[in-house]
């Protein structure tokens, strides 16, 4: 599990592992290496934003499919 100083809290704390897995999958698809030590200070802002944006798009797509009943 990654360390975070963010004050954001997950609505479903058990989703942490799934979100971390999704982060690694998206980063791999984009060809961006996630730091193994968990320190993101050397990662370009553009890369971090690309990962976050792709995760958000994927989560919205999953929610839309779930609401439409096509899941």
Image (cartoon, rainbow, N blue to C red):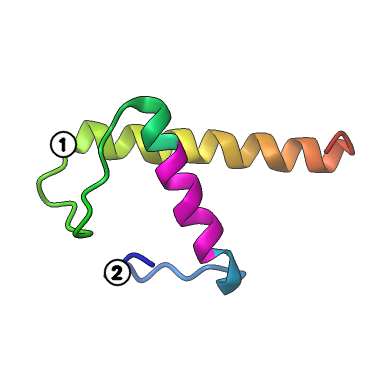
The answer to whether residue 21 is magenta is: yes
* Residue in the foreground of this view, choosing between 51 and 11: 51
Look at 39% across and 41% down and name the residue there.
Answer: 52
Quarter of the N terminus within the rendering: bottom left
The answer to whether 22 appears left or right of 14 in the picture is left
Look at 80% across and 43% down and name the residue there.
Answer: 66
- Asked if marks 1 and 2 touch (Cβ < 8 Å), the reply is no
Quarter of the C terminus within the rendering: top right
Q: Callout 1: 10 Å neighbours few (<14), some, many (20+)?
A: few
Look at 37% across and 26% down and name the residue there.
Answer: 30
* Secondary structure category for the residue under label 2: loop
Q: Where is residue 11 in the image (x, y as percent from the top left)?
A: 59, 69
Q: Position of residue 9 (x, y in %)?
A: 47, 71
* Secondary structure category for the residue under label 1: loop
**Which residue in the protein does label 1 denote?**
44
Q: Where is residue 10 in the image (x, y as percent from the top left)?
A: 53, 68
Distance in Å between CA atoms under marks 1 and 2: 18 Å
Residue 27's image quarter?
top left
User: Which region is colored magenta?
Assistant: 16-25
Magenta stretch: dominant SS?
helix
The answer to whether 1 appears left or right of 40 in the picture is right
- Mark identifier at residue 3: 2
């Amino acid at each position: 599990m990654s360390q975070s100083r963010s004050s954001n809290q997950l609505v479903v704390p058990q989703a942490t592992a799934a979100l971390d897995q999704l982060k690694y999958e998206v980063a791999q698809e984009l060809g961006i290496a996630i730091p193994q030590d968990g320190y993101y200070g050397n990662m370009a802002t553009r890369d971090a934003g690309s990962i976050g944006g792709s995760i958000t798009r994927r989560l919205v797509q999953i929610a839309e499919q779930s609401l439409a009943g096509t899941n």
